[in-house]
Structures are given as structure tokens and as C-alpha cells.
Image (spheres, rainbow, N blue to C red):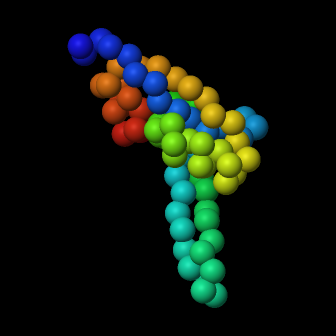
Amino acid sequence: MPNREYPYYFIKVGTLYYVYHSYKNVKKKEVSSYEFTNDESLAFPIDEESAKQLADECGGQIVIKNATFNDYISQGER
């Protein structure tokens, strides 16, 4: 089944794609920081539940992609 395709998800805000986020505690309050890119090939693939949560947090849209497992891994390594 190496050629079987599976769904994965990107978060898109305007023309930007989600790459990374981090959390910090500032004055005893958790603060989120997000990184985006305008190059879809650098977007970070995530699972459906994480995509829903991130889209809610940043006001983005969920973009569904399909790829083989190896292509999915390659996308996440960029």
C-alpha cells in the first residue's frame, strides 16, 4: 500500500500557511506565537483535530490535501 493516499491538513490565513507555533508564560499568562509562510511547500502538515483547533485559534481556514505516507513525511521535514 505504498501508493495509498491519506488526508492531511494545512492552516491558511489569507495567503499565508501555518508553519509553527510556541507557547510562553508571560506574567503568569500563557501567550501563543505563530509562524506563517507564503510558500505552500513549506507549510507544516497536521492532523484533522489539530487543524480545527489551530484554525479556531488563528482565524484560519483548513486546507485538505491528500498524499502518500512518504510524501506526507517529506512535507513535514521541509
Left or right? Give the position of 14 relative to 44.
Answer: right
- At horizontal 54% and vertical 68% (from top left) the residue drawn is 23
Q: Is residue 13 left or right of residue 33?
A: right
In this view, the residue farthest toward the left is 1
- Across and down, in percent, residue 6 comes to 40, 22
Image position of 63 (left or right of 60):
left
Q: Residue at x 67, y 54 (%)?
A: 57
At x 52%, y 63%, the residue is 22
When the figure is inspected, residue 46 is found, relative to residue 31, above or below; the finding is above
Q: Is residue 22 left or right of residue 34?
A: left
Task: Please identify the quarter of the rendering in which residue 32 is found.
Answer: bottom right
Residue 17's x, y, as percent? 62, 39
List x then y, in percent, for residue 49.
Answer: 51, 42
| Quadrant in which the C terminus appears | top left
State the quadrant of the N terminus. top left
The image shows residue 40 at horizontal and vertical percentages of 57, 31
- Residue 78, above or below 36: above
Residue 57 seen in the current view:
yes
Q: Residue furthest front?
A: 49
